[in-house]
Amino acid sequence: MQHHDVLIVGGGMVGNTLAAILLQQNFNVGIVEASPEKPWDTEQADLRTFALTRASEYIFRHTQTWDAMQASRISPYEHMHVWDATGTGEIHFDCADIHEPSLGYIVEQSVIQKALTQRLSEFENLTMYRPLKVENFELTGKTMQVHLNNGETISTQLLVGAEGAHSYIRYLAGIPYDMHDYGQQAIVANIKTELPHQFTAWQRFLPTGPLAFLPLQDKHWCSIVWSVDSPHALRLVDLDTDEFHKELEAAFEHKLGAILESSQRVAFPLQSRVVRQYVQPRLALIGDAAHTVHPLAGQGVNLGLLDAATLGEVLINAKHEDFGQKIVLRRYERWRKGHNVMMAGAMYGFKNVFGHSAPPVKWLRNFGLNLTNSSGLAKKVIMRQAMALEGDLPQLIKCFD
């Protein structure tokens, strides 16, 4: 029977990042991934993009994958401009105000995954199980016995569920969660604009949801994330190209001029989940398996990467203990759960406040935006928080900050 110190289920960005952190400290790691192995194509622009915080940058620097991402394709954004479609409220953030080179980076999924895959291939203490799935598992003494769908059984000191919002590990463990369905979908696409994006992340809050234009490497190309009610989303996806461009230009107030080109459009449902337990004896959940949030602030993957860095630090510090014990894993849960729950609540609150049409609420939020915009100190605090450079952070982030 194959044995691993840690067996990670899910070979996505968060699971692979945790693997890289542990492998660098000579843990024996296994990864179970359901999809077959495939080369990540970074020649073509990927529809899935992520707004990475500076903290996420530092995590990737620690795993020695950041240089490969930079060599491929990343887009730093130096400014962020947010405004309300129902009034005059707006706020503008500038990285120069806090003496930072950028506020964050827009990076495609394929670029991140290719860099992580290359890095993982350098380790002899990693075993990949793909394309395979976990059928069940049981706790046996000081190990978890994990049964795969090819009949193989693996033992591990710690089983980590990192396979996303519909985690089968979470289901098998019987861990409950609270879910809120927003009744919306997010439309994602890459679009070419008449005017350059100015290395600015733009976000307009419409009554139906936020519309974000995120700058890509080419100064005339942006990735959009447009949150709208589900029936409207289906209509927008089905529109012909010219009609879609007209609706997008109007929704964005022609801020970057005409829409000249656009890629395929994809929509995905918006839901938030708050898992009640992150850990059990010899089991832990990270990333979307533990929490999902509304994408309006682009924090989903960043929260997951912080989970990976935090769990990694807890396990490294307890390497010479029996780190699969719940008393050890609770250190990770206490460290991350409060912050993740707070972030999920904040995203829910933002969505409701900006979606409210009552005149007093509209006046208050526009007044609040303008008041914050006039306060240099408040903006500096918000920028540091958004970059995830404040609070109780794992040591590997502090080493770079």
Image (cartoon, helix red, strand yellow):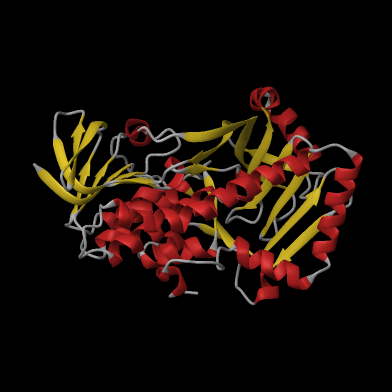
Front residue (pair 184, 362): 362
Q: How many marks?
A: 0
Relative to 33, is 368 on the left or the right?
right
Front residue (pair 114, 24): 24
Relative to 202, is 393 on the left or the right?
left
Where 330 falls versus 360 (above or below)? below
Q: Position of residue 216 (x, y in %)?
A: 59, 53
Q: Quadrant of residue 12?
A: top left
Q: Quadrant of residue 294?
A: top right
Where 268 falls versus 329 (above or below)? above
Q: Residue furthest bottom?
A: 99
Q: Residue furthest left?
A: 1
Front residue (pair 312, 298): 312
The answer to whether any part of residue 358 appears in the image is: yes
Q: Quadrant of residue 259?
A: top right
Residue in the picture at 41% in, 62% down:
60
Residue in the picture at 26% in, 33% down:
134
Relative to 398, is 158 on the left or the right?
left
Residue in the picture at 37% in, 61% down:
65
Relative to 257, is 344 on the left or the right?
left
Q: Position of residue 387 (x, y in %)?
A: 58, 63
Front residue (pair 293, 76): 293
Residue in the picture at 24% in, 30% down:
136
